[in-house]
Amino acid sequence: MCLAIPAQVVSIDGNTAIVDFGGVKRTVSIALLEKISPGDYVIVHTGYAIQKMDQKEAEESLELWAEVLAGDQPPET
């Protein structure tokens, strides 16, 4: 199974970018994409930005991820 996660581009340096996964920042390759700018949303898989996505689609996806992660918490005792 492949897992790709949306992230927002914070800054760009050549073919790499710092992206924000909801507060967690990582460096990823943007070599596979053209015309990426800070503020854009991309889908990241194994350290590579593989697709640009629009803001609405990214926000909807991030909301779904938040719901999945919230449901994965152990019950409080």
Image (tube, rainbow, N blue to C red):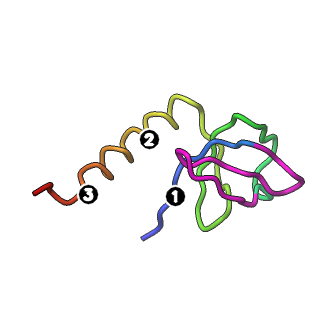
For image coordinates 87% across by 52% down, the residue present is 13
Q: Earlier in the sequence, mark 1 or mark 2?
A: 1
**In the visual, does 48 lie left or right of 61?**
right
- Which contiguous range is marked in magenta? 11-29
**In the visual, does 69 lie left or right of 12?**
left
Which secondary structure class fits the magenta region best? strand
Q: Earlier in the sequence, mark 3 or mark 2?
A: 2
Q: Tag on residue 61? A: 2
| Quarter placement of the N terminus | bottom left
Q: CA distance from mark 1 to mark 2?
A: 11 Å
Label 1 environment density (alpha carbons within 10 Å; few <14, some 14–19, many ≥20): some
For image coordinates 57% across by 52% down, the residue present is 24
For image coordinates 14% across by 56% down, the residue present is 75
Q: Tag on residue 4? A: 1
> Seen from this angle, which residue lies furthest top?
56
Q: Quadrant of residue 44?
A: bottom right
Residue annotated with mark 3: 72
